[in-house]
Each structure stands twice: as C-alpha cells, then as structure tokens.
Image (tube, helix red, strand yellow):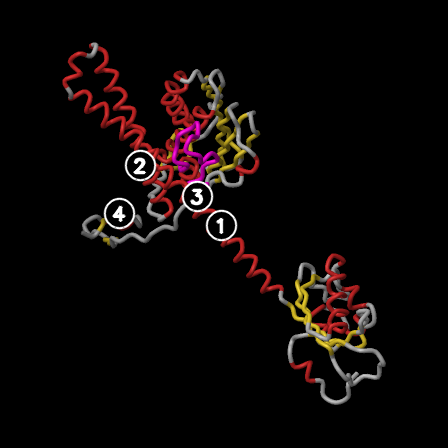
Amino acid sequence: MAPGVDLTELGPDCYSLHGADGRAYYVNSNARGLFGCRPEDLMDAGFLAQIHVQDRVAAARAISDCLAEGVEKHVQFRVQRAHGPLDRTQGSWYLMHCRPAGKAAIDVDVPLALVVTRDISERRMIEEDLRIAREKAESLSIAKSRFLASMSHELRTPLNAILGFSELMQSSAMEQMPAGRQKEYTGLIHSSATHLLNVLNDILDMSKIEAGKYDIVCEPFKLANTLAACCAMMRGQAQTRQIELLLGDSSDIPEVNADERAIKQILINLLSNAVKFAEPGGRVEVGARRIGRNVSIKVTDNGIGISPEHMASLGEPFYQADSKYDRKYEGTGLGLSVVRGLVDLHGGKVEFESEKGRGTTVTVTLPINPVEAKPVPATEKIEVLKLSRDRECADRGFTITRRAV
C-alpha cells in the first residue's frame, strides 16, 4: 500500500490497481462502504469474483484493453454478492473507470491500471423512471393522435346522416316518397343524434375525471335493483343483435354506499361493450356477489376477445385495440377509461381477463362502504339554557337546548 496519507479515501469512490488479467494488487478502504466488504476480500481475483457473472467479462476486458491500448475505458456492472454483514449490494449498479496507472507506488513488476469504481444505482433508478415516463408519455401522445384522427369519422358520420336526412325531409322529393319513409328517416336522425351525444358525453366525462371535477355523491342503494335496471335498458339492443343477455342471481347482494348514477354509467358502458363485441347468437352474462367488505360485479361475453398485447393498455384514455379507419367496431376508445376513472373515484378496481376468440370478462370490485370523510365541525353554535321556570327539569339534571339563530 502506498505510504503516507491516502487521499483517495476522502471521497466515496473505491480506488484499486489491477493487472492486465484483472487481478487486484491494491484496494482502498472505501470498498467497505461501497461494496459492503473488506478491501482484502477484493484482492487478487476477489474483485472480479464480486462482479455479476453476466458483467464479469466486460469488466475484465475493460481493464485489459485499457492497458493494451493505453487509453481510458469505462464499463457498468452489477455486483453478484457481498461478503459479511454489510450485504446491501443486491441489485446495485456500479460505474468503473480504467486508466493506465503509469509508475505505481507499489512493489510490482507488471503494468497496472487505476480503476475508480462509483455506485450509480440511484442514477440508474432515475434513468429507468425517466425511460418509463417517456415511454408512457409517447404512448399517450400516440393514442391521443389516433383518437383525434378517428374523431373525424366518429363525428362526421352521424352529423352527415343528420344533415342529409333532414335536408331530404325538407325537400320537395319527400312528397313522392312512400308514407313510411318519413318515419324511417326520422328514426335514422334520432339514432345518429344519440350516437353523437354518447360520443360527446364520453369525452366530457373523461375530461372531468382527469381534471378531478367529477363529483361523486355516495348514498345507500340496492345494487341488485340497479343491475336489473341496466340489463333491462340494454336488453333491446342485445335482442337487435341476437345476443342473449343473462342476469345471475343477485338476491344476496347487500346495499352499497356509492354514487348510483356513476355505477349505472359503469354498468351501461360494460354491457354496451360486451354486446358490441359479442357475435350474433352469443351471450352476455352479468353477475355480482359479496366478497368480505367488497362487492364484485362481473360482465362476461363470449365474443371476439382481446389479444394479449392489448390487455395492458385497456382502460387507458383514447386507447383502441383496433385504431384503423376501416375498423369493424365504432367507438372513441373512452368507454373503458371512463369506467376505470369512475371505479377509482369509488376506491375500487377493474380487472380484465380475455382470450382471443373466446370472449372477455371484466370484473369491477367496489367497497360496500367507502372510506368516510372526516367529520366537519358544525358552523352553528349551540346554546345550552337552563330554564328557571322549569324547576322540575333542573332538579332532575335535564338541560334544554336550542340552536342559536
């Protein structure tokens, strides 16, 4: 070891001297704080043995290339294990700088490389977080771009139908049409306007949820009745598509304390999706049961299913598994994101299970009684008055109270 004061110990980095074969001839005392082991444990082949087996060859090559080429080299590596009680290196990342040491102040006859090793685990974690955030932002940006591009189809189609049929009904050509044609055109205008309203409602609801301005008013209500009402609302649409809509036994479901309007919207969106993606002659099953302090609602269809690569993105705003302009199924891609947002506001969760060509199951889990808000002190003062004329009440220790006006 070099005589005198070792200035390398003033910082957190570990300094070491290595031969071309990677053998360590000197390791300073910072090894204990950096690797969690004694410097002598890293001498000779101990330094390379400490490095993860997948990174060991790269580290050894950096040292040998540094001495062979006479230039600086650097490499990142992971630690495989640590000796002694200070084992804190699992999953840690290190950056190793190598440079020719020149004439070293130790008694050896081989060329040496000065290796400076620094813990970069925190930097790697930050870089990984930034990478994930960047990928998420890029994915959301792409989804929004696709959404905006598809809105021309979703908005123009019903608007063109409304304008076209209304102009036709106002023209003189309508007088030559059969009597029932006017009723048919009126129905088409109504269905187009309904579709347009649903699209706009989804956009507005998602905007309010993302902005935190969607108000949830929780009140006790019978979930079984709400399930039956939503199934009754969707049964006509299911029959039109020749889909069998089945409601399971929900007699044992307790009352839930939630926003009934929001729960209805959740159920209608899920049922609408299930009916839309089920094949003619298929079926949609709805069921609910109590699980501890929660209630679980399942909507299952035997329709087209979802590919595994699309499962992770379900429920993200503006996401559509089929984003092509000629896609078979219409929609903005906001229905499931509205569902997820409303469920989150209730403190619940949404889970998706699907297999391509075999159908999809969406499970919504809601707390029966959500976490109550902290009590707010009354704004009105309470006066406590003892009425002297009512001696009997006073003798018995009763007090008569009234609110101050």
Other residues around mark 4 within 10 Å, as few (<14) / some (14–19) / many (≥20):
some
Q: Look at mark 3 in the image and give the residue it sits on.
A: 143
Of the pair 329 and 327, the residue shown nearer to us: 327
Q: Give the number of the mark in front: 3 or 4.
A: 3
Do the CB atoms of the residues marked 3 and 4 lie less than 8 Å apart?
no
Residue type indicated by callout 1: Lys
Element at label 1: helix
Task: From the image, tell me which residue sits under label 4.
Answer: 393
Residue underneath mark 1 = 136
Q: Label 3 sits on what residue type?
A: Ala
Residue under pointer 2? 200
Mark 1 neighbour density, 10 Å: few (under 14) some (14–19) many (20 or more) = few
Question: Neighbour class for label 2 at 10 Å: few (<14), some, many (≥20)?
Answer: some
Q: Which label number is shown at residue 405? A: none
Indicate the amino acid at tag 4: Cys
Task: Tell me which label, 2 or 4, sits earlier in the chain.
Answer: 2
Q: Which residues are magenta?
A: 316-334
State how far apart marks 2 and 3 are (Cα). Answer: 18 Å
Q: Is residue 318 magenta?
A: yes
Choose the circle earlier in sequence order: 1 or 3. 1
Whole-angstrom CA distance, mark 1 to mark 2, is 26 Å
